[in-house]
Image (tube, rainbow, N blue to C red):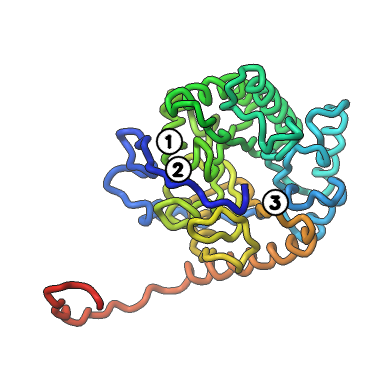
């Protein structure tokens, strides 16, 4: 859903009573971060939705040759089509390729037209037609089985856009009910479901993710987790991206990363937006995140091989900067100058 301006989000669904709106414990700011765990090495991946002009085997070999640790594999008609015959045998082939190349994987389910060739991301889990909702549920269940066969870290999904004639409370109940069989399958398979807040969707923010948790009776994070898109944090969250990472650390199961500008939902190559990435990567590392951090550039397949190489170089440099800043001694304490009187009108002219 790139290139759109997100709707204003009134955050009508507060977090649970024991947490603030971002899920942080009371009395502790997300900016405080977790108390002092050692930084974990980050594992970078690249999304196949940004390599749609390549055969899947070619894309996987490219990423391994570049030095990526893994891949965000979007099940789509050109990459491990989940609706084509012989899915089990094709999945076994992909598992062998991943093993040979030493790549880990997260399964993503954001293919635009894999279910409906006329409607982007249709049908969704919010579709008024129960049969069409069931089509999406079947796809997600199938994605969980593929993920289990590939040893994936998680299965990504999102809510979809609320239909115009559907009240919020009806949409949330429909969404929660539709996720039930998917969560049952994920529990049996031992693969977490990682829901992504998507600008313009019913579940569009971190606050909305916590509302979904409440709707579902607060499942364990090992079953219902979060996909955090760092660009979406810049686009619409009230906190800076690094603070978002710290706020959701207990639920974080998958990370997508790209550059973005405030208020504009457009996935951009690194350096073309406004995000300061070393603090984001530092927050991921010190928070103990163990999954993949996957570059998400779904509108850039025409330049996919080049951007895959440039993106990994950028992320490695940003991670090195973060590590250097973390290792630097704190600045010497200085005495603040006496406060300057502020004019009665207040503020700067």
First in sequence: mark 3 or mark 2?
2
Disc 2 secondary structure class: helix
User: Dot 1 corresponds to which residue?
Assistant: 210
Is 120 left, or right, of 58 in this rendering? left
Residue at the location (87% across, 29% down)? 89
Mark 3 vs mark 1, CA separation in Å: 27 Å
Q: Position of residue 306 (x, y in %)?
A: 78, 64
Disc 1 secondary structure class: helix
**Mark 2 packing: few (<14 Cα in 10 Å), some, or many (20+)?**
many
User: Dot 3 corresponds to which residue?
Assistant: 298
User: Dot 2 corresponds to which residue?
Assistant: 206
For the residues labelled 3 and 1, say whether their Cβ atoms are less than 8 Å apart: no
Residue at the location (42% across, 55% down)? 243
Between 163 and 78, the residue placed more toward the observer is: 163
Between 154 and 55, the residue placed more toward the observer is: 55
Which of the 4 image quadrants contains residue 131? top right
Which of the 4 image quadrants contains residue 227? top right
Residue at the location (86% across, 33% down)? 90
Q: Position of residue 13 (x, y in %)?
A: 37, 35
Q: Which mark is residue 310?
A: none
Mark 1 vs mark 2, CA separation in Å: 7 Å
Residue at the location (69% across, 23% down)? 135
Q: Is residue 91 visible?
A: yes
Q: Position of residue 274 (x, y in %)?
A: 52, 65
On screen, residue 342 above or below 158: below
How many numbered markers are drawn?
3
First in sequence: mark 3 or mark 1?
1
Between 54 and 290, the residue placed more toward the observer is: 54
Disc 3 secondary structure class: loop
Q: Is residue 216 visible?
A: no
**Mark 3 packing: few (<14 Cα in 10 Å), some, or many (20+)?**
many
Q: In the picture, which quadrant includes the C terminus?
A: bottom left
């Amino acid at each position: 859903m790139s290139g759109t301006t997100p709707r204003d989000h009134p955050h009508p669904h507060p977090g649970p009573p024991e947490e603030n709106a971002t899920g942080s414990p009371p009395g502790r700011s997300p900016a405080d971060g977790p108390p002092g765990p050692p930084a974990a090495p980050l594992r970078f991946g690249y999304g196949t939705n940004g390599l749609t002009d390549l055969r899947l085997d070619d894309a996987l070999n490219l990423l391994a040759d570049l030095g990526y640790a893994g891949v965000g594999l979007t099940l789509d008609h050109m990459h491990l089509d989940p609706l084509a015959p012989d899915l089990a045998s094709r999945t076994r082939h992909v598992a062998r390729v991943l093993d040979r190349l030493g790549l880990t994987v997260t399964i993503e389910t954001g293919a635009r037209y894999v279910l409906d060739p006329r409607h982007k991301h249709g049908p969704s889990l919010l579709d008024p037609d129960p049969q069409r909702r069931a089509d999406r549920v079947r796809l997600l269940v199938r994605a969980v089985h593929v993920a289990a066969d590939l040893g994936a870290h998680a299965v990504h999904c999102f809510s979809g856009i609320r239909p115009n004639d559907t009240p919020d409370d009806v949409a949330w109940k429909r969404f929660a009910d539709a996720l039930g069989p998917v969560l049952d399958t994920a529990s049996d398979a031992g693969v977490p479901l990682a829901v992504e807040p998507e600008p313009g969707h019913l579940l569009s923010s971190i606050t909305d993710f916590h509302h979904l948790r409440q709707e579902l009776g607060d499942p364990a994070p090992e079953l219902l987790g979060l996909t955090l898109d760092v660009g979406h944090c810049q686009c619409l969250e009230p906190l800076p991206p690094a603070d978002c990472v710290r706020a959701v650390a207990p639920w974080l199961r998958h990370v997508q990363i790209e550059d973005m500008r405030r208020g504009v939902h457009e996935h951009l190559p690194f350096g073309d937006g406004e995000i300061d990435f070393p603090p984001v990567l530092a927050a991921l590392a010190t928070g103990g995140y163990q999954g993949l951090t996957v570059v998400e550039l779904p509108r850039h397949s025409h330049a996919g091989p080049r951007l895959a190489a440039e993106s990994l170089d950028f992320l490695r440099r940003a991670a090195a900067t973060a590590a250097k800043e973390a290792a630097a001694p704190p600045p010497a304490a200085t005495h603040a100058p006496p406060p300057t009187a502020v004019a009665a009108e207040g503020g700067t002219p």
